[in-house]
């Protein structure tokens, strides 16, 4: 068969299919972005979300979750989501500030008093304010996953006071607020992609980083940075987010299904998170890590005052939103 013949036969077949199937019944083939490995609470939450959407829409919507960051870095994925090239993903609000500045509020150190308080605020009016800001940028938040609290780890020494951070080379996520946070304690901050951290610690490009127990464990960072100091300085929610372009293209019934699936996957992820956090701590300790609690976090909190001052001086319009979170009980 000649090439042109194949093309025209193919075109005919496609045209015939399009004519035979009403628009709404065409399966939508979603792409989901995920930075984490397949066996991770975020990953299981996303798979459950996609499975529920496919099942409840009777296969009208189908899709695939791409794990381990194979679809690129978070900043690129967010831009693709906004354009509708990516349909959904789970994004840490840490680096989200570049695209949606209002979300920087939750990247302020110690802004939440505890993880349960984070849930409560993100599920309530303060979270709704962030959802509105996200939506303005073409992102629909379906729910907030748990990402625990982030603490420092390094290959040199335990950290007990802010002074211990002095002179340490610390990798941070891409956001100037995190650079300011480390610098406020006299450390040297290096913004870097998640995927590069293991090698950078191993080769001494940085001395350490900061993260929650499941990420510290699943990336094997604990093998190359064996001091884990529970400063718990950042509690950053992660959003299960959809492209507004994709969402707006759904029927009202499909939108309801998607919202419910988002809620259900959020509940599931939060449950799995607690279990994984405990399991990760066991793996970390068994792997020879020296873990130290920091009972009095006040010196760390005090060290963050200049970070807040600089942030509010540069972004006075954020004062009310910051206070909404900061003053919450
Ligand atoms: C993990 C977050 C992930 C971030 C990563 C990081 O779940 O979204 O990319 O930290 O430190 O805890 O980059």
Image (cartoon, rainbow, N blue to C red):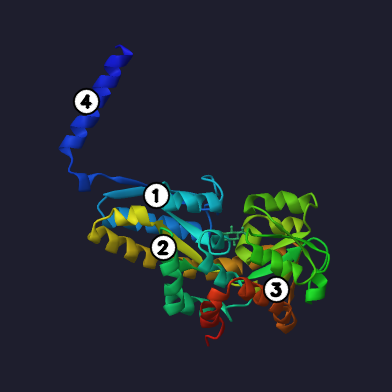
> For the point 62% across and 60% down, which residue is it?
215
Residue 230 circle label: 3
Disc 2 target residue:
136
The Cα atoms of the two marked residues, 4 and 1, are separated by 28 Å
The Cα atoms of the two marked residues, 3 and 1, are separated by 39 Å
Which is more N-terminal, label 2 or label 1?
1
- Ligand 1: does it lie within 8 Å of the C-beta at label 4? no
Quarter-wise, where is residue 142 in the image?
A: bottom left
- Ligand 1: does it lie within 8 Å of the C-beta at label 3? no
> For the point 16% across and 37% down, which residue is it?
20
Which is more N-terminal, label 1 or label 4?
4
Dot 4 crowding, Cα within 10 Å, few <14, some 14–19, many 20+: few
> For the point 56% across and 65% down, which residue is it?
276
Residue 84 circle label: 1
Residue 175 versus residue 48: which sits nearer the camera? 175
Disc 4 target residue:
12
Quadrant of the rendered image holding ligand 1: bottom right
């Amino acid at each position: 068969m000649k090439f042109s013949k194949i093309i025209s036969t193919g075109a005919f077949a496609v045209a015939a299919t399009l004519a035979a199937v009403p628009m709404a019944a065409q399966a939508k083939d979603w792409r989901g972005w995920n930075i984490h490995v397949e066996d991770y609470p975020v990953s299981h939450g996303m798979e459950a979300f996609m499975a529920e959407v496919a099942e409840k829409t009777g296969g009208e919507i189908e899709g695939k979750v791409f794990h381990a960051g194979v679809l690129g870095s978070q900043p690129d994925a967010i831009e693709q989501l906004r354009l509708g090239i990516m349909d959904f993903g789970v994004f840490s609000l840490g680096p989200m500030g570049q695209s949606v500045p209002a979300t920087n509020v939750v990247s302020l150190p110690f802004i939440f008093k505890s993880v349960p308080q984070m849930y409560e605020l993100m599920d309530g009016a303060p979270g709704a304010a962030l959802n509105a800001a996200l939506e303005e940028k073409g992102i629909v938040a379906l729910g907030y996953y748990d990402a625990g609290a982030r603490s420092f780890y390094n290959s040199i020494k335990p950290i007990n006071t802010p002074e211990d951070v002095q002179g340490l080379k610390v990798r941070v996520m891409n956001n100037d607020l995190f650079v300011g946070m480390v610098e406020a304690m006299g450390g040297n901050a290096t913004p870097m992609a998640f995927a590069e951290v293991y090698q950078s610690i191993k080769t001494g490009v940085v001395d350490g980083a900061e993260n929650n127990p499941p990420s510290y464990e699943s990336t094997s960072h604990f093998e190359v940075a064996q001091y884990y100091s529970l400063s718990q300085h950042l509690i950053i929610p992660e959003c299960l987010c959809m492209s507004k372009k994709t969402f707006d293209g759904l029927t009202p019934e499909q939108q309801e299904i998607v919202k419910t699936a988002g809620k259900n996957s959020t509940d599931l992820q939060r449950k799995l998170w607690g279990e994984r956090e405990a399991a990760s701590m066991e793996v970390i300790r068994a792997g020879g890590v020296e873990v130290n609690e920091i009972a009095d976090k006040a010196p760390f909190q005090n060290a963050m005052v200049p970070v807040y001052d600089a942030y509010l001086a540069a972004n006075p319009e954020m004062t009310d939103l910051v206070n909404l979170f900061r003053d919450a009980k």
